[in-house]
Structure formats: structure tokens, C-alpha cells
């Protein structure tokens, strides 16, 4: 559950960053904003922990392991728990509620899909007429070689594209009688753009996100933004095809008067988004500004950060682990059954200071010393002090001693030993 909690808050942060990018691109094409929101949605299906695990599995060379404070902060962020201590029973209850909610959402959509299938089942294949001709002209104009199937039905549901692999345009017969040819062509072009953009498939991806994270209000808010930007993107493309803004807006309005909405979230229809604002934008038909190099650079950097930050976090964990291993390796052993003590090879006698001789100070200085794997003396610590001058003399002398290094499993290791140096004045 720690991993799930971390994934949720990390995805929330990414969604907040996506909102900032969308605001930056508010005057650009709707397809750009739709792609940003879609990336934020797909982040919920792509745990950073997965990328971090990939990073940990890669054979990073020691020299390339990051060691900066920023990397350390990222590493902590991607490896620290985001949850307080909760009993195992509580986790099981939360997991059960989560799974039940997901099943309820999926069951609801399955029921809605069954309704759509039942409505379309009795539809008749369209092989001629104004809608058929309008769609084929639009396909030729857009360079589409695979024709889209059209079916018509008596039910007054709005026109929409159904299906993922081979989308089918569902068209109500009543709408053909209610719209003149130019408006039929504009509405058909709108549905064709949905096919070109693979909007049903993209909507299905977000449906999975909504089912898996049904409890997160931000997921549903992103879904509304996706629908709004999807319809705006289609509107912009229809106008780019050369259709009259007034005729197109009037066609949408008449469609909403004649038909009812398709009862399924991943069916790309005509009335999605904020209708009043959509009509106002269509009639104004203001050209969209190009992204520009600066915004492109910002979007590319954001994408790279989305991919590389968890990898840095994973490699940073490797660095921390390697550092910990190095620290463990540098800790001296103590002589014992598995550790052979160092053997003194070269001894240097300490020198009495003039003051210690004058004060006739005698006794022992006891030190703990680390005999390193190369036989040299490392850190020295006074355990039993005699006199400041003699303590320092003992340290200076012991630091020059040389040993045959201690071993563990036949390999030289650092060993902590106790050294006693006596100071005695000659009589």
C-alpha cells in the first residue's frame, strides 16, 4: 500500500504540472492541451516505481552514480513512505473498498455499453445518400484510404463514432431530414476527425484510469478536460477543412435539439464539452497561435523530466546502497573466531617529553587503533590517558607501526586492535 500511496501523490503532482502547462498553452491548438491532459491521465497507469525499478536493475558504473544533494532529495522522495503506520487489517479493508469501487464503475460502463449495442444492433447499413457522399468526400479530402462504415437508425441519439479497431459512424435518420447538406457535411467531418484522432481509443485509456482511481476527484476532472479539449480540437480541424463557421455552429445546435446524447463516455459524439462556449468559439473562428520554440522546449523538458526523474531516484537509491556498503566495508572488524588479528611487524618507540621526564611521569597509555587492510595504522583513539604530552607521543609512535594485516575468510580486512604503550624512566 505504500507503493500505491506514493504512486497516487506522485500522479497528483504530475497532474498539477500538466495544469500549469495547459495554462501556458491556452492560446495554442486544443490538440496540444488534449495531449498534455492525456499524458497526465496515463501517468496514473505508469507508476514511477516501475521506472525506478528499471533504473535499479541497470548495471550503473560506480563513477556515474549521482551524489548531489538534489539527487539525494529525489531519492528520498521516491523511496520514503507516504503513509502513517496503519494496521494490516485496515489496509485489507481499504484495498477491499478500492476493488469494489473499481468493479462498480466497470459494471456501470458495461451496462451503458450494452444499451448502446442494443440500440445499434438494429441499425441499417448506409451505402448511399447525402451522409454517405459527405463522408466519402471528407475521406478523400483528408487522404484516408480505408472507408468508415456508416449505419443509420430510427432512435434519436446524436451521431457518434463507435468502436476501437474499426470505428462505425452511427447516424440518426431524423437528423438527415433536419439539416441541409452543408451542415450535414460539417457534422460528418467532425465525426471523421474523431476517427482520424483515434479518440475512442484514447477515451478508453482514461476510462481505465477512472475505473482504477474512481475515488480521486482529480481523475474525473481530467476526464472532463479531455472531453472539452477533444471537441475543441475537432472543431478547429473541421474549420481548417474549410467549412463555414456559421453553418457548422448551426448544425451542432440543431443536432442537440433533435437528438439525445450517446450514453457512453468513450463514444466520440458531437455535443461534448461546454456547448455554449464551443459555439461562441466556432463562430468567432479565431486562429490558434503556433507553439513557438520556447513552449516546445518547455514541453520537451517536462516530458524528459517525467521519464528521467524516477530513473534518477532509482539510481540514487543504488548510490546510497553502494555508499552504505562501502561504509559497512570500511567498518573495522574485531579479532574473533572468523577474524585473524594483525601481527606487529615494525614497532616505533615513543619519545619522552622533557616536562614528563622532569615530572617523573610513568605509566601506560592504552589506545584503540584501526589496522587497515594494508597493514598501516588508521584512526587512533585514547582509551586510558596518562599525560597530554605522553598521550600524543604514544599516538605519534603507534601511527608509525606496521602490521601484517588481519584477515577474514582469507582476505585482508581492517581490524580494531588495542595497543598499550608503557612509559618507564630509567633508574
Image: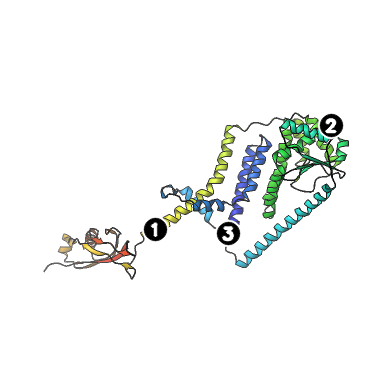
Residue neighbourhood size for the residue with mark 1, other residues' Cα within 10 Å, grouped as few (<14), some (14–19), many (≥20): few
Instruction: State the separation of the CA atoms marked 2 and 3.
Output: 58 Å
Q: Residue at x 43, y 49 (%)?
A: 61
Instruction: State the separation of the CA atoms marked 1 and 3.
Output: 28 Å
When asked about the image quadrant of residue 323, the answer is bottom left
Residues at circles 2 and 1 in contact by the CB criterion of under 8 Å? no
Q: Residue at x 62, y 64 (%)?
A: 91
Residue on which the image places disc 2: 181
Location of residue 231 in the rendering, given as x and y in whole percent from the top left corner: 73, 39
Residue 158 vs residue 146: left or right?
right
Q: Quadrant of the N terminus?
A: bottom right
Residue neighbourhood size for the residue with mark 3, other residues' Cα within 10 Å, grouped as few (<14), some (14–19), many (≥20): some
Location of residue 297 in the rendering, given as x and y in whole percent from the top left corner: 56, 36
Q: Residue at x 45, y 54 (%)?
A: 320
Residue on which the image places disc 3: 2
Of labels 2 and 3, earlier in sequence is 3
Amino acid at each position: 500500500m505504500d507503493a500505491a500511496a506514493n504512486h497516487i501523490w506522485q500522479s497528483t503532482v504530475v497532474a498539477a504540472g500538466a495544469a500549469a502547462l495547459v495554462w501556458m498553452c491556452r492560446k495554442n491548438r486544443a490538440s496540444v492541451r488534449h495531449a498534455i491532459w492525456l499524458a497526465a491521465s496515463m501517468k496514473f497507469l505508469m507508476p514511477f516505481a516501475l521506472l525506478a525499478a528499471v533504473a535499479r536493475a541497470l548495471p550503473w558504473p560506480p563513477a556515474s552514480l549521482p551524489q548531489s544533494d538534489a539527487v539525494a532529495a529525489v531519492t528520498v522522495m521516491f523511496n520514503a513512505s507516504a503513509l502513517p503506520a496503519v494496521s494490516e487489517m485496515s489496509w485489507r479493508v481499504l484495498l477491499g473498498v478500492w476493488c469494489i469501487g473499481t468493479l462498480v464503475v466497470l459494471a456501470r460502463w458495461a451496462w451503458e455499453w450494452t444499451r448502446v449495442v442494443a440500440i445499434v444492433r438494429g441499425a441499417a447499413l448506409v451505402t448511399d445518400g447525402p451522409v454517405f457522399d459527405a463522408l466519402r468526400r471528407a475521406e478523400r479530402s483528408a487522404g484516408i484510404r480505408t472507408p468508415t462504415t456508416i449505419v443509420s437508425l430510427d432512435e434519436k441519439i446524436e451521431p457518434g463514432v463507435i468502436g476501437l479497431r474499426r470505428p462505425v459512424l452511427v447516424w440518426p435518420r431524423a437528423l438527415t431530414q433536419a439539416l441541409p447538406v452543408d451542415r450535414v457535411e460539417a457534422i460528418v467531418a467532425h465525426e471523421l476527425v474523431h476517427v482520424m484522432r483515434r479518440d475512442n481509443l484514447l477515451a478508453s485509456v482514461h476510462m481505465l484510469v477512472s475505473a482504477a482511481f474512481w475515488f480521486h476527484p482529480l481523475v474525473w476532472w481530467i476526464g472532463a478536460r479531455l472531453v472539452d479539449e477533444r471537441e475543441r480540437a475537432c472543431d478547429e480541424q473541421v474549420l481548417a477543412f474549410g467549412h463555414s463557421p456559421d453553418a457548422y455552429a448551426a448544425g451542432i445546435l440543431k443536432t442537440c435539439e433533435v437528438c439525445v446524447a450517446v450514453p457512453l463516455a468513450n463514444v466520440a459524439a458531437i455535443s461534448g464539452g461546454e456547448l455554449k462556449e464551443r459555439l461562441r468559439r466556432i463562430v468567432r473562428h479565431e486562429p490558434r497561435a503556433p507553439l513557438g520554440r520556447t513552449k516546445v522546449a518547455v514541453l520537451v523538458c517536462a516530458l524528459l523530466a517525467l521519464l528521467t526523474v524516477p530513473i534518477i531516484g532509482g539510481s540514487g537509491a543504488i548510490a546510497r546502497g553502494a555508499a552504505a556498503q562501502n561504509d559497512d566495508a570500511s567498518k573495522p572488524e574485531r579479532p574473533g573466531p572468523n577474524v585473524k588479528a594483525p601481527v606487529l611487524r615494525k614497532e616505533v618507540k615513543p619519545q619522552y617529553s622533557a616536562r614528563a621526564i622532569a615530572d617523573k611521569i610513568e605509566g601506560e597509555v592504552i589506545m584503540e587503533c584501526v589496522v587497515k587492510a594494508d597493514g598501516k595504522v588508521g584512526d587512533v583513539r585514547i582509551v586510558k590517558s596518562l599525560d597530554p604530552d605522553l598521550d600524543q607521543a604514544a599516538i605519534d609512535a603507534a601511527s608509525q607501526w606496521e602490521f601484517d594485516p588481519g584477515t577474514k575468510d582469507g582476505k585482508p580486512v581492517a581490524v580494531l586492535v588495542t595497543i598499550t604503550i608503557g612509559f618507564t624512566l630509567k633508574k
